[in-house]
Image (tube, rainbow, N blue to C red):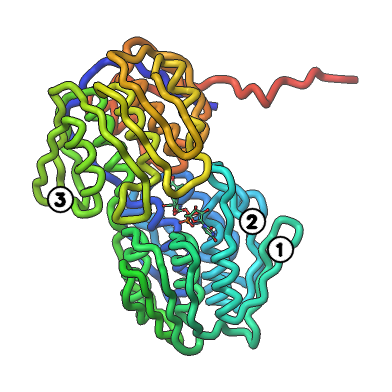
Amino acid sequence: MKKYVIHGGRPLYGKIEISGAKNAAVGIIPAALLVEGPCRIENIPAISDVDMLLNILRDLGASVRMINRTTVEVDCAGARCQTVPYGAGRKLRASYYLLGAMLGRFGWAEVPLPGGCDFGSRPIDQHLKGLAALGAEVRVEKGYMCATAQGGRMKGSQIYLDVASVGATMNLMLAAVLAEGTTIIENTAKEPHIVDLANFLNSMGAEITGAGTDVIKIRGVDKLRGGEYSIIPDQIEAGTYMAAVAATGGEVRICNIIPKHLECITAKLVEMGAEVEEQGDSLVVRRNRPLQRTNVKTMFYPGFPTDMHPQIAAVLCLARGTSVITEGVWDNRYRYTEEFRRLGAKIQVDGKIAIIEGVDHLSGAPMEACDLRAGAAMIIAGLAAQGTSEISNVKHIERGYEDIIGKLSGVGADIRAVEVPDPEQKKVPAVG
Ligand code: EPU
């Protein structure tokens, strides 16, 4: 088991290269199942969620070959229609995309119910409602979602989502691309990764219009052909490093980004006293004035992303005055607050609202990462705090951040990973 040790209190200077977007990659990799012939996917992030999905494709019989560090070639010609192994599928939130993709490809799927970060209840009723509208019979049995397309092929339909769910929008796109007839999905999510998945599928021959708006139209096609595609940069990874610079002070160029995707985050950091300068596909973030309070409400895109909530909270802990964060997407995203209090943060939670009274300084302490973004926020808090912090349970962080230690060390952070014994694997005394 690993933990991260941080000696905080140093401003950050230099440049950080942003990797491909996790939440696009975890939709695009299962989408390769729908493609006939090899497809080359570039700008793949080296994170454990991606490794798990590529291994699942291998288990299904696909050929998966890393061409270089960020490019993979996937050929699903040899993929078989079989149950997704429970162990790997259960650990991932994104395993639900295999349901849509396998239904599209085979007309049949058995996929473990998804895992992922724990933010309270994470229903998938909108996925199931949409798949049923497309002609699938879905039931949950022994921890698996088991689905069969009536007549062996999905059928185009009109679907209205009660909530603009990212997962349901992407899953239904996957299920509808090879369906017979046209599908219209209303009240869809508009996040950049939705558009990226549509662009990937269109580049392989799909006919999808409207991605990035409230209504997506998919004209079913008979087949998708192989090709090449490059995944967009990760909005949340970039936002996390921007928040880190705001918290510690200094000046860092965040490279390989799409500035438009970061406007909501930039706006808040500027309100708080950071300077953000757009230079082509980079943003230069600097902060050399005291941080000021602000209020933040998380929403669906183009609103402030829920996946930046804990990271912005870490910055606000050091801002002058009282700030309020309102969580507008998840029921329970506040488990990080208990850990922040160990550093001396003054933060109270009331339902979906956190009230943060800024303090002069934080002091390093041990913390336990409870989910991916909370873990990233603990790193930010540790970097800004005086003294030493230790973060345990970092497997959550490594699910979604490529080489976070290397990237932060490269801009002057004193952070390293150390191996510690796993308390769950206590030695069993030998008997007999
Ligand atoms: N919802 C329903 N029914 C459904 C699906 C969702 O009521 O069938 C509700 C949820 O309870 C939640 C809201 O809709 O209140 C949004 O959920 P959504 O389905 O959009 O979330 P998701 O697809 O499970 C993705 C990201 C999350 C990110 C959310 C919101 C992936 C793999 N995960 O989750 O990312 O928080 O969208 O933007 O794309 C992360 O990267 O750290 C992460 C957790």
Report the mark closest to the observer, 1 or 3. 1
Disc 1: which residue = 140
Q: In the image, what residue occupies the spot 51% across and 74% down?
A: 175
Q: In the image, what residue occupies the spot 68% across and 25% down?
A: 425
The kind of secondary structure element at disc 3 is loop
The CA distance from mark 1 to mark 3 is 45 Å
Q: Amino acid at mark 2?
A: Leu
Q: Is residue 392 visible?
A: yes
Quarter of the rendering occupied by the C terminus: top right
> At which x and y percent is residue 110?
66, 66
Neighbour tally class for label 1: few under 14, some 14-19, many 20 plus, Cα within 10 Å: few
Q: Amino acid at mark 1?
A: Val
Quarter of the rendering occupied by the N terminus: top right
Point out which mark residue 113 bears: 2
Q: Earlier in the sequence, mark 2 or mark 1?
A: 2
Q: Earlier in the sequence, mark 1 or mark 3?
A: 1
- Residue 417 versus residue 92 in the image, above or below: above
Callout 2–callout 1 Cβ contact below 8 Å: yes
Neighbour tally class for label 2: few under 14, some 14-19, many 20 plus, Cα within 10 Å: many
Disc 3: which residue = 281
**Front one among 219 and 431:** 219
The kind of secondary structure element at disc 2 is loop
Q: Is residue 255 left or right of residue 224?
A: left
Q: Is residue 265 left or right of residue 1?
A: left
> At which x and y percent is residue 337?
46, 27
